[in-house]
Image (cartoon, rainbow, N blue to C red):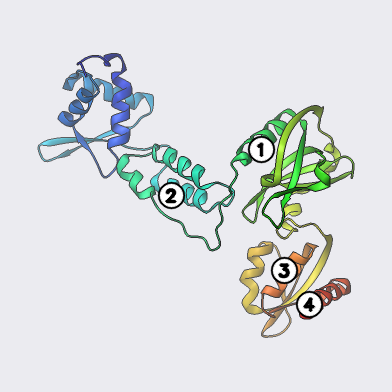
Amino acid sequence: MAKGVNQKMKLLYLAKIMQEETDDEHSLTMPEIINHLNAYGIEANRKSVYNDIEDLNCFGIEILSERSGPKTLYHCGARTFEVAELKFLVDAIQSSKFITARKTKELIRKLEKLTSRHAAKHLEREVFVAGRIKNMDESIYYAIDAIHTALNEGKMLQFRYFRWDLSAQKEYRHEGRKYRISPWGLCWDDENYYMIGYDGEAEKIKYYRVDKMTDIRILDEKRKGNAEFKKLDKGLYTKKRFRMFDGVERTVTLKCRNNLSNVIVDQFGREVHMQPVDEDHFTVNVDVAVSNQFYGWVIALGGDAVIVKPKEAKEEMEKLLKTYLEQ
């Protein structure tokens, strides 16, 4: 490359070199910086680079210098993201079920550009999550974008909703008829994205798994259900539902062994009141949308938790267990 061809972009290339080649553990000397600039077809001398480094610092790209014997070493200092923060983001992306394998790689490559090439090697990590199955369909990204647009513009959405049949093919709900729903929010539960929306026909708030929504379109109609959504406590709404399955909301009293105190707090939060009943057990009242998923959660505790009341919940639990035994 001919010298001076990129001279007007000298400051930009200097920023690129310092951000990509240096960090707190890796520095460059002034001759090395000049050599890197030369490789980009940029002529430079010490005085001009000193001035450029001062300009970068004034702009907000921190370039630090320190003496090491007879040499002065330069490296990029504070960045928008620390390496530890980028690792958190990489782990979240890799462990997320709704992000496809291809999109996972793309996102991680982009995150690597936010740090030096040396630190980027530490982002090439594998997060192993039991039973992890990545989403196969990237249309979820367009669905999420459409939902956000509808939320921002206060518009209704039209879409089809499906489940997987025995042949792993899409089977559309409502005989393929399109849903017309007013979106009011997005939530993430049990590694899945859900849209919270108002069904005007049923006159109630419902939720829909975003990865099961297809043929999504923003309608030129104002969304409905504002009054119903304002009455909704979003935190409690999602907290009461196990795996976002609906059910009759009840206050359920559980009797648990003391070793489950951590499990109860993790599931229902620190505000729950656990009342000791003897040396080995406590009771706790929890507000939940009672469903088979909730009963399954109780069963999974291996007998260390039992439903005390209400009577209806106990009877439903007994019926469910009887069905399992019969099968």
In this rendering, the count of numbered labels is 4
Disc 1 or disc 3, which is closer to the eye? 1
- Of labels 1 and 2, earlier in sequence is 2
Question: Which quarter of the rendering shows the N terminus?
Answer: top left
Separation of marks 4 and 3 at Cα, in angstroms:
28 Å
The residue located at (75%, 58%) in the rendering is 240
Tag 2: Cα neighbours inside 10 Å, few (<14), some, or many (≥20)? many
Residues marked 2 and 3 touching at CB (< 8 Å): no
Residues marked 4 and 2 touching at CB (< 8 Å): no
- Residue 152: give x, y in percent of width and height: 70, 30
Type of amino acid under label 3: His
- Residue 241: give x, y in percent of width and height: 75, 58
**Residue 143, labelled with which disc?**
1
Query: Is 112 placed left or right of 161 in the picture?
Result: left
Residues marked 4 and 1 touching at CB (< 8 Å): no
- Residue 273: give x, y in percent of width and height: 72, 68
Separation of marks 4 and 2 at Cα, in angstroms:
43 Å
Which residue carries the number 4 mark? 321
The residue located at (63%, 69%) in the rendering is 263
Which residue carries the number 2 mark? 87
- Of labels 4 and 2, earlier in sequence is 2
Query: Is 68 placed left or right of 20 in the picture?
Result: left
Question: Which quarter of the rendering shows the C terminus?
Answer: bottom right
